[in-house]
Amino acid sequence: MGAVVVVAVLAALLAAPVQRALVARFAVPEGEPRREACPSCGRALRLLPPTGRCPGCRERLGAGPWTVEAVAVAAAVAVALGADGPAVAPALGWAAAVGVVLGFVDARVRRLPYRLTLPLIVGTALLLVVAALAEGRPGVLLRCLLAALVIGAVLELAVWLGALGPGDSPLGLALGGLLGWYGWSAALGGLVATVVLAGLWAAVRAAAALARRRPVRGLHLPLGPFLLLGALLAVLAY
């Protein structure tokens, strides 16, 4: 297990420059085009160092220094510990890698771009099929599909009611399918954990606002990070 964790950490550190660049590219307000290059020097945003500064002009872009790397390593270790055998590890790794980018983007600009959620859905589905065939468990794919549809539908209903953004249901669809591999308890547990974590964070922010004698407003939370963390906790628990 120790060797697997070391490999996961190294893979996360190798992927982090790409993830950091993707955060800088996609963390733009709704309706604005992706940031394909540094706004100061025009250098293409393909890789960014842990400092988050443009290699050309040193302007800081995207997430704070070492934050992406720290989260990527933590997610990689959790995936290494929570993988239910080597077959499903690639699906977990893909979800973790894209999830790190989605979490940072949602936290910064309150949106989950379809250009990131759709590859997450397709990649996760394909890797789950490969995992099921490799383990001789094609029947588990039906549960994965149903779990994805149930969680996706619940979140889509919240979108229709105006409680969530349109990107939350595609993310829930991908994570629901992944949690379906572990069973219905994991899928529903991940959803419950998401609600609890988001509620606790909202309560903390409200208490902090009251302590500073400021109006309790602007507590709209990005659900993406909580969906991802809830799914991760469910994988580790089940």
Image (cartoon, grey):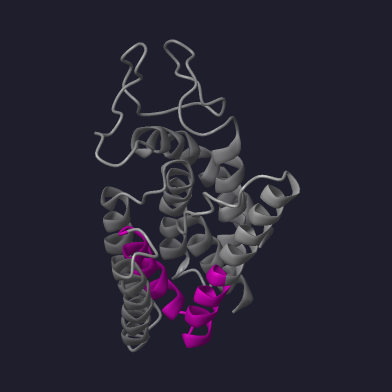
Residue at 55 percent across and 79 percent down: it is: 189
Residue at 30 percent across and 63 percent down: it is: 121
Relative horizontal placement of residue 94, taking residue 116 as reference (left or right): right
Relative horizontal placement of residue 146, taking residue 80 as reference (left or right): left
Determine the image quadrant of residue 136. Answer: bottom left
Magenta stretch encompasses residue 27: no
Numbered range of the magenta stretch: 166-195
Q: Could you tell me if residue 130 is visible in this image?
A: no
237 or 168, which lies in front? 168
Main SS of the magenta part reads: helix
Residue at 55 percent across and 29 percent down: it is: 50
Q: Position of residue 40 (x, y in %)?
A: 37, 12
Please tell me whether residue 10 is drawn above or below residue 135 in the rendered image.
above
Quarter of the C terminus within the rendering: bottom right
Q: Position of residue 99 (x, y in %)?
A: 44, 54
Determine the image quadrant of residue 133. Answer: bottom left
Q: Could you tell me if residue 163 is visible in this image?
A: yes
99 or 217, which lies in front? 217
